Image (cartoon, grey):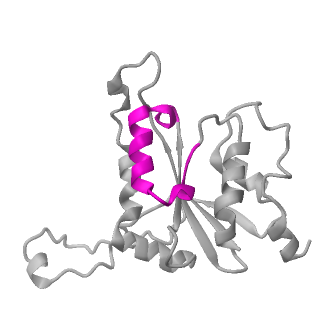
């Protein structure tokens, strides 16, 4: 199949109906199968940022005020959960998948006190945005990452509002995967909003 034909094909159209509704599916398994035979691929725990913090230069005055171990630090970085690559065009979208409890029917409001969703906000920081944009090669006007939420957090009235505000106009870059037995909404979201960034 020619590259132009692959670009036109919806990634979810060939996804086997036998998998939908059978059991919970992992994000990786869903996309590994959906990308089969296309120009896109998925990697677990991309390691291109494993030394991101090692290379941060500090001034002599700061170095004089902090602990400096005898042995140099060789690994100190960031590991997104996944990377979706178009190897032909050398473009990458980084993915965080966050599962978290939440305040839903039958649970106290305190059930939503986890902070996995807050930790995912590190990718909004200026330095990491610049780093991910450089490696991902998606352009300066888009977020170079996609965050997928799972679990009760996806129905928590407080956490859903927080996440919606944080992402603001970048609504394509987060997704509430409320039913892991049904991968179709997840695949359709990717196909409608994010696939184009990689083509």
Residue found 38% across the figure and 56% down from its top: 121
Point out the stretch of residues depicted in magenta.
151-176
Q: How many marks?
A: 0
In the picture, which quadrant includes the N terminus? bottom right
Q: Is residue 181 left or right of residue 95?
A: right
**Residue 38 position in % (x across, y down):** 81, 66
Residue found 69% across the figure and 69% down from its top: 196
Q: Is residue 196 left or right of residue 143?
A: right
Residue found 12% across the figure and 84% down from its top: 60
In the picture, which quadrant includes the C terminus? bottom right
Q: Quadrant of residue 122?
A: bottom left
Magenta stretch containing residue 49, yes or no?
A: no
* Residue sitting nearer the eye, 161 or 136: 161
Q: Against 167, is 21 above or below? A: above
Residue found 85% across the figure and 76% down from its top: 4
Using the rendered image of the protein, determine whether residue 133 is visible from the camera's viewpoint. yes
Given the current orientation, which residue lies at the most extreme top position? 106
Given the current orientation, which residue lies at the most extreme right position? 1
Q: Against 25, is 2 above or below? A: below
Q: Is residue 22 left or right of residue 126?
A: right
**Residue 78 position in % (x across, y down):** 42, 64
Magenta stretch containing residue 173, yes or no?
A: yes
**Residue 127 position in % (x across, y down):** 35, 73
Q: Quadrant of residue 90?
A: bottom right
Give the overall secondary structure of the magenta segment.
Answer: helix
Using the rendered image of the protein, determine whether residue 81 is visible from the camera's viewpoint. no
């Amino acid at each position: 199949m020619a590259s132009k034909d692959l670009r036109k094909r919806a990634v979810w159209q060939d996804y086997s109906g036998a998998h939908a509704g059978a059991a919970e599916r992992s994000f990786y398994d869903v996309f590994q199968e959906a990308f089969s035979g296309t120009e896109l691929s998925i990697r677990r725990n991309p390691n291109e940022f494993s030394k991101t913090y090692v290379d941060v230069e500090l001034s002599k005055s700061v170095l004089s005020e902090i602990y400096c171990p005898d042995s140099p630090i060789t690994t100190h970085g960031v590991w997104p959960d996944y990377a979706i690559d178009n190897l032909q065009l050398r473009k990458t979208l980084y993915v965080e998948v966050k599962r978290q409890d939440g305040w839903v029917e039958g649970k106290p409001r305190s059930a939503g006190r986890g902070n996995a969703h807050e930790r995912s906000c590190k990718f909004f920081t200026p330095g990491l945005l610049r780093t991910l944009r450089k490696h991902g090669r998606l352009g300066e006007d888009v977020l170079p990452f996609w965050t997928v939420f799972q679990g009760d957090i996806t129905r928590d009235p407080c956490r859903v509002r927080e996440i919606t505000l944080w992402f603001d106009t970048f609504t394509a870059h987060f997704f509430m995967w409320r039913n892991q037995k049904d991968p179709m909404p997840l695949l359709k979201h990717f196909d409608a909003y994010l696939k184009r960034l990689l083509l």
